Image: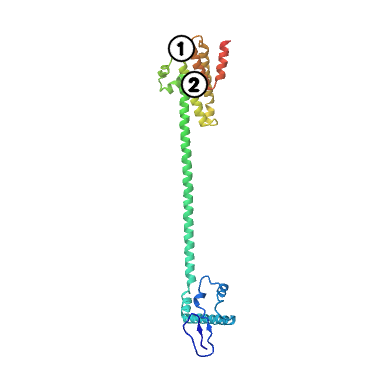
Amino acid sequence: MNRFYFGGSDSSDDGDDTLPYPKPLPRSAFLAPDFDPSTFLSGLHNRHQTLEDLRSELHTRSQEINKELLDLVNENYQDFLSLGSSLQGGDEKVEEVRLGLLGFRRDVETIKGKVDERKREVEDLVEERRHVRNEIEIGRTLLEVNRRLQELEQRLMIISDAANENLNGGSGAYDPSESEEESDDEHRSGMSTSRLRRHAQSYLCIKKAIAHIGPEHPFSVNQEERVLRLKQTILLDLGSALKQTKNDEEQGQERLLRLLAVYKEMGEYSEASKVLKERGS
């Protein structure tokens, strides 16, 4: 039976069957990545072909593909066999690689352990160095506080002559700079306010340094009596100077205000009020 297809130029005038037939289904239609059977079948409504003819054509195409696949396997059968032979002994090579990787892993873990251990050692050494530096700084502060205590005790004349000689290198001499800023009121009313103020400032510096060291430090505990004695001596000198000050003159009033400022700087303003009440009575 002769047939002619849509879109073709071939036709036959012989025979009774002169109806047009659709072209065979192209193989490329089945190779699309997004091939969908439902979509493909729905696009065949213009083929002028019965369902039975379409089923027969698809069946024929399937058989052709199966035959091609079988021919391909037969043609490459020897290659498949040689591929299997070449893979023999692969398990041993895989095992060798696995053992090598395990050994490498153990080496890495060993090195990592040594690095971690050295890291901890370095951290401990850094912490120890920080602690030593802190102890050195505290030691320097302790020496400085002790030096200031001795100097102030010497100025207030509340230490022995032997201690004075140790402090001044055996000279026992008093620092002449103490009298540089003395005013004329020292000759009339005792110690000058400038010297009293310096004594108070030295006392406050000592208190601040001891607070920085810590009140619970053994050195701070041992120096409490010395610090208290310094405070009492300074307050005693301030009280004596305040009682001797005459407030009936302008110079006396200025001296009185300077003495009260020293009391306030020490935080002992209540002590000044007490002395003023005693002087008034």
Spot occupied by residue 168 in the image (x, y as percentages of width and height): 41, 22
Mark 2 burial class by Cα count in 10 Å: few <14, some 14-19, many 20+: many
* Residue lying farthest to the bottom in this orientation: 15
Q: Which residue is mark 1?
A: 185
In the rendered view, tell whether residue 25 sits above or below residue 166: below
Occupied quadrant, residue 224: top right
Alpha carbons under labels 2 and 1: distance apart: 19 Å
Q: Nearer the viewer, mark 2 or mark 1?
A: 1
Q: If you read the primary sequence from the N terminus, does the residue marked by circle 2 or circle 1 appear first?
A: 1
- At 52% across and 83% down in the image, what residue appears? 20
User: How many numbered markers are drawn?
Assistant: 2
Q: Which residue is mark 2?
A: 200
Whether residue 233 is visible to the viewer of this picture, yes or no, is no
Q: Toward the viewer: 101 or 170?
A: 101
Mark 1 burial class by Cα count in 10 Å: few <14, some 14-19, many 20+: some
Q: Toward the viewer: 10 or 161?
A: 10
Spot occupied by residue 72 in the image (x, y as percentages of width and height): 48, 80
SS at circle 1: helix
Type of amino acid at the residue the image marks with label 1 = Asp
- At 47% across and 27% down in the image, what residue appears? 146
- At 47% across and 48% down in the image, what residue appears? 119
Spot occupied by residue 8 in the image (x, y as percentages of width and height): 47, 81
Q: Toward the viewer: 194 or 95?
A: 194
